[in-house]
Amino acid sequence: MSSPSKRREMDLMKLMMSDYKVEMVNDVMQEFYVEFNGPKDSPYQGGVWRIRVELPDAYPYKSPSIGFVNKIYHPNVDEMSGSVCLDVINQTWSPMFDLVNVFEVFLPQLLLYPNPSDPLNGEAAALMMRDRTAYEQRVKEYCEKYAKPEDVGAKPEEKSSDEELSDDDDYASEDEQVAGKADP
């Protein structure tokens, strides 16, 4: 490889050609979203997540930043931020890995084999260690509530102000709401 930017382009193209739905945030190819399906034969099966990926300037020598956008119940994923605790991404990253590895190996392995002894979500880790059946039921509830295929298409901030206004039938227009009632 001649430069990190060429490698970034090549890895991104390889990811897109691997049938992953990739949505670019900008033209610089450093920030994008990937649609990720939960692995088969796991409580995450059927769930679909929007994964935010940020590539540092030094990629592939420095690891990508990976985070779940929609909620997931997992000991090694922070429920609020979506940050992932995964050694291969955070500590043992190598330039030999590429983006396809992240989505075909690392994330599926994370979901199939959670590590409750190194949690970002202490509640999920405790439940998993205490009652595996209840933990798997909670995972499935989260999948049903937050990880349906239709949940992935819309970004949380995409709810338009028009939709919010149409929910409020008390006012004919936004101007009337702001102005209030006229003095008698």
Image (cartoon, rainbow, N blue to C red):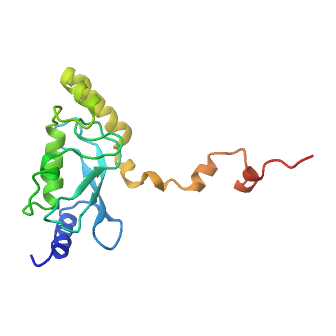
Q: Residue 34 is drawn in which quadrant?
A: bottom left
Where does residue 49 sit, x and y in percent of width and height?
Answer: 30, 48
Does residue 94 appear to the left or right of 128 in the view shown? left
Does 97 sit above or below residue 136? below
Quadrant housing the N terminus: bottom left
Residue that protrudes farthest toward the bottom in the picture: 2
Q: Is residue 40 visible?
A: no
Q: Residue at x 78, y 48 (%)?
A: 180
The residue drawn where x is 20% and y is 74% is: 5
Which one is nearer the viewer's eye here, 66 or 24?
A: 66
Would you say 108 lies left or right of 166 here?
left
Residue 45 lies, in percent from the top left, at 23, 40
- Residue 42 against residue 105 in the figure, above or below: above
| Number of on-image labels | 0
At x 28% / y 70%, what residue is drawn? Answer: 29
Which is more toward the observer, 73 or 172? 73
Q: Extreme right residue here?
A: 184
Can you name the residue that lies furthest to the top here?
130
Residue 20 can be seen, yes or no: yes
Q: Which is more toward the observer, 171 or 40? A: 171
Query: In the figure, 124 relative to 58: above or below?
Result: above
Q: Position of residue 60 (x, y in %)?
A: 14, 65
Question: Residue 166: x and y, percent?
Answer: 63, 50
